[in-house]
Amino acid sequence: MNKILVTGASGQLGSEIRHLSSQYPFEFIFTDVAELDITDEQAVRHFFETNKPNAVVNCAAYTAVDRAEEDIETADKINHLAVKYLAQAAQEYGAKLVHVSTDYVFDGNGHRPYDELATPDPQSVYGDTKLKGERAIIELGIADSAIVRTSWVYSTFGNNFVKTMRRLGAERSELNVVADQVGTPTYARDLAAFILDMLPDFASPKTELFHFSNEGVCSWYDFALAVMEMSGLDCKVKPIPSEKYPTPAKRPFYSVMSKEKAKAQLGVEIGHWRDALQRCIGEM
Ligand SMILES: NC(=O)C1=CN([C@@H]2O[C@H](COP(=O)(O)OP(=O)(O)OC[C@H]3O[C@@H](n4cnc5c(N)ncnc54)[C@H](OP(=O)(O)O)[C@@H]3O)[C@@H](O)[C@H]2O)C=CC1
Ligand SMILES: Cc1cn([C@H]2C[C@H](O)[C@@H](COP(=O)(O)OP(=O)(O)O[C@H]3O[C@@H](C)C(=O)[C@@H](O)[C@H]3O)O2)c(=O)[nH]c1=O
């Protein structure tokens, strides 16, 4: 029996893993900051010593992209230093590690889907701290560890762009949304299934990077339009350029990721973002 520690389990991804957990023959330990604060190095070691998980899926993160620009130290603690503590504990106690990262590690100046060999160049504090977290794992040379980069995550659980659009769409008759930032949305349930499916057989002498999102490409504007349409909301969405929606953090203009490696090596079949969105909104 595999004993899987899930950190940050009250967030979107963690909640989706919990939702799917009864379908998998694993024993799960779900923790969020109250049960295991991953920035507390001693607490992390103690937790591994006491519970001896065979695997850890790190869903904990500092995901407030704009707030991170001001709150650099906290973002770094959670997205970087804490990831090192988890990786060290996983190495010491022989547990598999699956860590989740982001498309925001890329500068967004590309025009073809980024694969796992593409050079990251984050443009925001959030992206920078997430990249430092990735590197902390890679530098340890830890076996049986995977970093899954994903993008534009939403779920019925937690906070996300889909929920923001539904709220604003119900309140307003018109909404401006950026149309020059392009990427791929990811239903957290599909990401959760991908991670749980890969875990049992996953083995690697070093850290493997994988990209995972739903299929297809869209702008935030296209995404917002689809949310309104599928939610039956009569709110007019207007496309605007990024300079008309100034934010503290710079977002990549293009952050589409190639999933070829995950498909070839792990045999995953991935649904289109519109179908995934429809499934999620159907549960809201
Ligand atoms: N959301 C997105 O669009 C994307 C997310 N990702 C990555 O996917 C992963 C999962 O994201 P998602 O589920 O959306 O994130 P959420 O923000 O929904 O959840 C993160 C969870 O981690 C918790 N947490 C924060 N600090 C700590 C801590 N010190 N110890 C333990 N838990 C803590 C949060 O608690 P609290 O809420 O109290 O802070 C929250 O419950 C993250 O690695 C994220 O970077 C990648 C691409 C896109
Ligand atoms: C609410 C709103 C946002 N926007 C823009 C701002 C931004 O450029 C874009 C997305 O908005 P958000 O701030 O909700 O999304 P953001 O927090 O940037 O989402 C990111 O989160 C992190 C955690 C990730 O890892 C990324 O993959 C990505 O999902 O939409 C509008 O144009 N109009 C609006 O009314």
Image (tube, rainbow, N blue to C red):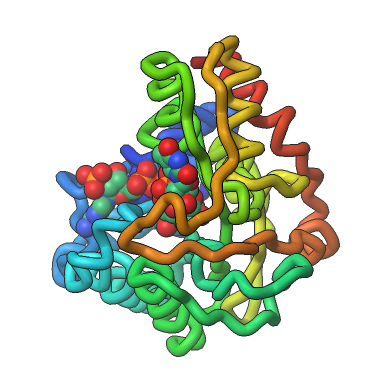
251, above or below 5, in the image: below
Report the front residue among 53 and 250: 250
Q: Position of residue 169 (x, y in %)?
A: 46, 20
Say if residue 45 shows up in the picture: no
Residue 269 figure quarter? top right
Residue 210 figure quarter? bottom right
Say if residue 259 shows up in the picture: yes
Residue found at x 50% / y 65%: 104
235, above or below 118, in the image: above
Number of callouts: 0
Report the front residue among 112 and 268: 112
Residue found at x 38% / y 56%: 246
Left or right position of 158 against 105: left
Q: Position of residue 281 (x, y in %)?
A: 57, 20
Residue found at x 49% / y 36%: 176
Report the front residue among 204 and 70: 70
Residue found at x 59% / y 40%: 239
182, above or below 26, in the image: below
Q: Position of residue 129 (x, y in %)?
A: 35, 73
Q: Position of residue 103 (x, y in %)?
A: 56, 63
